[in-house]
Amino acid sequence: MTDTTLDWVEIRSRVKEFLEQKIYPAEPVLQGTDRTAANLAMADLIEQAKAAGLWALGHPKEIGGQGMPFMEYVYINEVVGRSEFAQKVFGTLTHQDSIMLNLYASEKWKAEYLAPLVNGDIYPSFAMTEPDIASSDPTQLQTRAVLEDGHWVINGRKWFTTGADEAAYTTIMCRTEENAAPHKAFSMIVVPTNIRGYNILRDTPILGLNSGHFEVEYDNIRVPEDHLLGNRGEGFLIAQKRLGPGRIFHCMRWLGQAQRAFDLMCERLHERTAFGESLADKQLMQKHVFDSLAEMSACRQLTLQAARAIDSGDPARVEIGIIKVVGAQMLHNVIDRAIQVFGAKGLTDDTPLSRMYRHAREGRIYDGPDEVHVQSVARQVLKRYKEGGPGWDFGVRDSELV
């Protein structure tokens, strides 16, 4: 394991070097149809990452990680985001689930799942979204768990349960309280995926890709009462504690993806000529560079401001709502410009841009669609003015983070 007293800049540099030298060349195999070859390649990369001291950097030390402080780990995620496979390679994929399990699970489940989870021996999955309702309003979730004779009996159907096919367990968000207020009616229950009644229906294709986001039916699943995560009715509370930092990491990984697309775009501009001069000398092409650089720089500062707020103990709901929208749009725009610069080649799988573009479009929907975050942010800010408060003072917000 890495000595976490090392300069995080050095660790970040080592992660970037590993990505460029080890992960990028393996991507064709990792995303190929030969799953045996892909699994072997992934296992080899994981072992190399562990040997290099780059595994589980952000997991707390008390659960077996390297304990990198939150703000330093934020910068690591910026590099990890450059490849869709890097989270698994570096052991960051289980970060939020490990912390959630450590904080809220019973001692039994911590003993059974936590160490293997941090070590990458097993993987988690999380089930919230449902196909038949508008999941932008999660108080409509229909999956139910009823307590009978010391067991939770769960019925319902979820989709976009990422990694359900290889996960050891799924944390299911379900209704457990029939007469409670909407945000106190739901709980989270840990369910082993090999249990009777846990039925994977399909790998839901997304924009032409097999996505690894599964639709799963729960048919009278029975698990003991101690599978509850936290207390009854605390589902939304636990979800918010998970989603806040998680969205910071999402946005930093989006910046990493955008950086990779930006690098490819700028290199392409120097490689190609048209009408007697380099594409880099064309003013319209230069506009693509300028717009991308400006959007990435602005998004990065917004994300780091939100991260500093979270690190100070502020829930930063406004800042997080802003970066979720701005970050997803930035990522789409930068990759879109890179494809335009590549021309016909950008539409093929000869570059990573095609897959990146399709994944980027997902970002404006998962973890809440843009429209919900726009509405939520505007309401929170307008409420300050309606109540005669100090309004929204950018200078005050900055001073709170110093």
Image (spheres, rainbow, N blue to C red):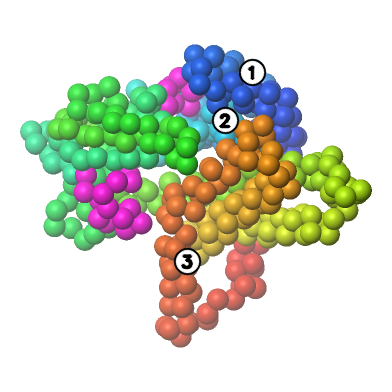
Q: Pick the residue in front: 238 or 85.
A: 85
Q: Where is residue 127 in the image (x, y as percent from the top left)?
A: 33, 40
Q: Label 1, label 3: how many angstroms apart (C-alpha)? A: 42 Å
207 lies left or right of 254: left
Q: Label 1, label 2: how many angstroms apart (C-alpha)? A: 14 Å
Task: Give the residue pinned by disc 3.
Answer: 374
Residue at (79%, 42%) from the top-left corner?
268
* Boundaries of the magenta span: 116-143
Q: What residue type is labelled 3?
A: Val
Q: In which quarter of the image is residue 373?
A: bottom left
314 lies left or right of 336: left
279 lies left or right of 42: right
Q: Which amino acid does label 2 sit on?
A: Phe
Residue at (88%, 53%) from the top-left corner?
281
Q: Along the polypeptide, which appears first: circle 1 or circle 3?
A: 1
For numbered disc 3, what is the local secondary structure? helix
Q: Along the polypeptide, which appears first: circle 1 or circle 2?
A: 1
Where residue 48 is drawn, which disc sits there?
A: 1
Q: Is residue 259 visible?
A: no
Question: Quarter of the image containing the N terminus?
Answer: top right
Q: Is residue 295 visible?
A: yes
Q: Which amino acid does label 1 sit on?
A: Gln
Q: Where is residue 259 in the image (x, y as percent from the top left)?
A: 70, 45
Q: Which of marks 1 and 3 is in front?
A: 3
